Image (spheres, rainbow, N blue to C red):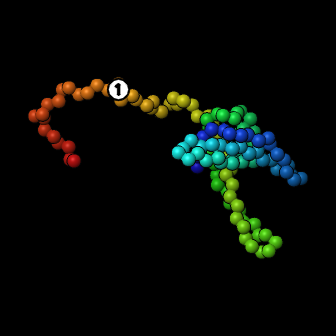
Amino acid sequence: MEVTGKIKKIDETKTFGNNGFRKREMVLTTDEQYPQMLLIEFVQDKCDLLNNFNEGEEIKVSINLRGREWINPQGEAKYFNSIQGWRIEKVQAGAPGEVPPMDAASFAPATNIDENEPDDLPF
């Protein structure tokens, strides 16, 4: 899956446990009618992907959704979700294949209309 938006915050890399598990989190603000603040985590060697990015940049992140179960001391199952990033790239204005918006005033009305021409459209 992919998500695009603007980087709101990038945290420092944190190390956990004796094995040196590394995790780095960032917050991405989506660009939609109701913007969402998504916490995306990068783990182990993927933490370094964020080194080349700054807050405020428009990006596209490839993500995986992760879920896990935890049994609390009372024996009840609790479920947690996380969003894990594995690739990140800058969104470029005018990227190849992107068509810029056209101004309606730049189109001239058709003047060579022939009413005698057959209308063969099926609708």
Horizontal side of 99 relative to 31 (left or right) equals left
* Residue pictured at 64% horizontal, 47% vertical: 37
To which residue does mark 1 refer? 105
Q: Residue at x 68, y 58 (%)?
A: 81
SS at circle 1: helix
Residue 65 in the image: above or below residue 52: below
Residue nearer the viewer, 72 or 32: 32
Q: Is residue 45 visible?
A: no
Residue 104 falls in image quadrant: top left
Q: How many marks?
A: 1
Question: Nearest the camera: 9 or 98?
Answer: 9
Residue appearing at x 74%, y 45% in the figure: 25
Q: At which x and y percent is residue 16?
A: 85, 51
- Does the image show residue 9? yes
Residue at position x 72%, y 67% in the image: 78
Examine the image and state in which quarter residue 54 appears. top right
